[in-house]
């Protein structure tokens, strides 16, 4: 029932506390799951107190349980254990505190955890989050690598050292976060989203060392897995050892078996690339040398054919000239002289073709095969 209050008619604290106690008391008992954050057994005490925190969010509640109930648990209760509590919420009006009064406590076993993970994995697979066609290729040589890892962790060292051993100029943008416990999902997700929003980050590696199933649970968290699936930057998962396989491995664009493997996969080997360049250079020189040799042979063959053709043509032209010379000679006056004929020329150099062209006393020049001589006409030709 709502109270009518005002500055002049306030209600006392005890009234509000009692109302809260009455309202919370009506909620009834519920099953609550969480992780034991703080538990310090109290010897000879009738009641035990522990802090139960949410597995994914920064929220916790105090749980009060009978010592006998806690003592029956197998394995014994300890910080970090996953438990399910059947409890009734209680509000202590005198102290203004809220707590859960436990009636039953159950340990969440590995089998149950694995079954839940298998169910979640099947659900995400059915949505297509693990489909090969969704996976983005890793860049050949990233300009800058985003690295999400634990603080001063071996995993960070393994990724950075192995990457720079292969490519010394590898540039990292590192985000050190919690990789285990209640804050892991939130911090890893925030680091992922911040790096994914940067245009200078070409690939993101999420890594941590090995651990128990419980230790690696944050990397099978549905919220984190979906954040990885929504990222536009290629993601490399390098969680634990080769046998470890959180759900993050399936949604990432590349699953590295170890942090060391991740360092070797995100960048090429400078030595290998130099060897490839040297080999290509040698192959290029061989190809050029062979081409030059081929062209040289072509040029030599062409010159040989040209020379042969020219010689053949010169011989043909020489033969033609000889024939023409012989033909011309056969048609020339010299050929006539060779046959015993003579050429008679007057004093003016004109050829005498008819005897009537001369008179007695004319001087003429007579040309024969070998030389010429002068003669005098002694008588006129008969009419």
Image (cartoon, grey):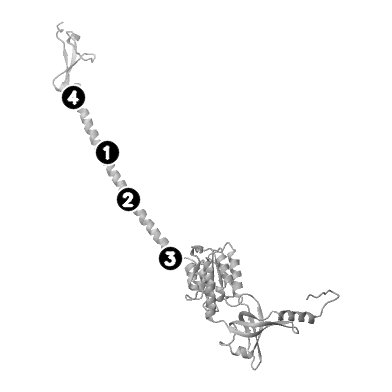
**Few, some or many residues within 10 Å of mark 1 (<14, 14–19, 20+):** few
Circles 2 and 4: CB atoms closer than 8 Å: no
Q: Is residue 43 above or below residue 57?
A: below
Q: CA distance from mark 3 to mark 1?
A: 56 Å
74 or 212, which is in the foreground?
A: 74
Name the spot of residue 255 as percent of width and height, x first: 49, 70
Q: Residue at x 15, y 23 (%)?
A: 338
Nearer mark to the viewer, of 3 and 1: 3
Vertical relation: 62 (above or below) 322: below
- Report how far apart the C-alphas of labels 2 and 1 lie in the structure: 24 Å
Disc with the residue nearer the chain's start (3 vs 4): 3
Q: CA distance from mark 3 to mark 2?
A: 32 Å
Which numbered disc, 1 or 4, marks the residue closer to the eye? 1
Looking at the image, is mark 3 or mark 2 earlier in the sequence?
3
Q: Which residue is mark 2?
A: 294
Asked whether 222 or 347 is in front, the reply is 222
State which quadrant residue 189 falls in: bottom right
Mark 1: secondary structure: helix
Q: Nearer the viewer, mark 3 or mark 4?
A: 3
Q: Which element is circle 2 on?
A: helix
Mark 2 is surrounded, within 10 Å at the Cα level, by few (under 14), some (14 to 19) or many (20 or more) other residues, namely few
Depth check, mark 2 against mark 1: the one in front is 2
Q: Residue furthest right?
A: 8
Residue, disc 4:
330
């Amino acid at each position: 029932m709502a109270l009518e209050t005002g500055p002049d008619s306030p209600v006392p604290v005890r009234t509000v506390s009692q109302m809260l106690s009455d309202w919370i008391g009506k909620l009834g008992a519920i099953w609550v799951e969480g992780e034991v954050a703080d538990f310090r057994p109290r010897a000879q005490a009738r009641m035990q107190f522990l802090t139960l925190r949410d597995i994914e969010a920064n929220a916790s509640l105090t749980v009060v349980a009978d010592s006998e109930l806690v003592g029956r648990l197998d394995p014994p209760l300890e910080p970090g254990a996953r438990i399910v509590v059947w409890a009734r919420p209680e509000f202590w009006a005198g102290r203004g505190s809220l707590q859960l009064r436990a009636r039953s406590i159950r340990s969440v076993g590995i089998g149950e955890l694995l079954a839940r993970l298998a169910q979640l994995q099947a659900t995400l697979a059915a949505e297509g989050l693990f489909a090969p066609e969704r996976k983005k290729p890793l860049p050949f040589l990233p300009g800058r690598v985003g690295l999400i890892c634990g603080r001063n962790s071996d995993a960070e060292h393994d990724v950075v050292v192995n990457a720079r051993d292969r490519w010394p100029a590898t540039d990292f943008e590192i985000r050190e976060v919690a990789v285990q416990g209640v804050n892991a999902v939130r911090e890893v997700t925030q680091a992922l989203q911040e790096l994914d929003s940067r245009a200078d980050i070409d690939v993101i590696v999420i890594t941590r060392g090995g651990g128990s199933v419980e230790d690696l649970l944050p990397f099978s968290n549905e919220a984190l897995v979906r954040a990885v699936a929504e990222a536009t930057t290629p993601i490399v998962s390098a969680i634990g050892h080769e046998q470890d396989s959180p759900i993050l491995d399936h949604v990432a664009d590349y699953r590295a078996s170890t942090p060391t493997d991740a360092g070797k996969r995100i960048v090429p080997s400078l030595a290998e690339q130099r060897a490839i360049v040297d080999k290509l250079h040698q192959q290029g020189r061989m190809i050029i040398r062979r081409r030059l040799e081929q062209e040289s042979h072509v040029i030599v063959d062409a010159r040989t054919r040209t020379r042969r053709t020219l010689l053949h043509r010169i011989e043909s032209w020489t033969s033609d000239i000889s024939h023409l010379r012989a033909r011309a000679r056969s048609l020339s006056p010299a050929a006539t002289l060779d046959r015993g004929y003579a050429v008679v020329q007057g004093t003016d150099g004109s050829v005498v073709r008819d005897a009537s062209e001369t008179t007695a006393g004319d001087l003429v020049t007579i040309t024969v095969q070998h030389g010429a001589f002068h003669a005098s006409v002694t008588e006129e030709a008969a009419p």
